[in-house]
Image (cartoon, grey):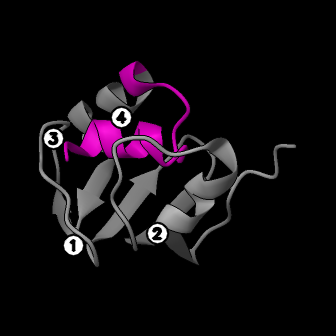
Amino acid sequence: MRLDKYLKVSRIIKRRTVAKEACDSGRVSINGKVAKAGTDVKEQDIIEIAFANKYIKARILNIAEHVRKDDAKDMYEILEGEEDKEE
């Protein structure tokens, strides 16, 4: 699965266009290497994302094309940083 689509489906980033912009601007890396939006992701990859005011490091646990909002957080494990607390 493409990196930008994974970020959107897993709801780490809410919109795919925002995910694509983050990837293409060099703020997202996979396993320590800067990744573009079209980069394929695999289970157990480590994703690092530098947002404007926070940093997230997460391990991919599951890849799925369609996921319900409640199940999206089961697709990854936060290793560093913190996840949004939206309700």
Amino acid carrying label 2: it is Lys
Q: Is residue 1 left or right of residue 13?
A: left
Mark 1 vs mark 4, CA separation in Å? 16 Å
Tag 1 secondary structure: loop
Segment colored magenta: 1-17
Query: Considering only order in the chain, which callout, 1 or 2, is on the residue closer to the N terminus?
Result: 1
Task: Count neighbours of disc 2 (C-alpha within 10 A) and say few if under 14, some if 14 to 19, many if 20 or more.
Answer: many
Number of numbered tags placed on the structure image: 4
> Could you tell which of marks 4 and 3 lies nearer the N-terminus?
4
Which type of secondary structure does the marked residue at label 4 adopt? helix
Quarter residue 25 falls in: top left
* Category of crowding for the residue at label 3, using alpha-carbon neighbours closer than 10 angstroms: few (below 14), some (14–19), many (at least 20): many
Circle 1 is placed at which residue position? 31
State how far apart marks 2 and 1 are (Cα): 10 Å
| Amino acid type shown at disc 4 | Ala
Instruction: Using the numbered discs, state the Cα–Cα distance from disc 4 to disc 2 in whole angstroms.
Output: 15 Å
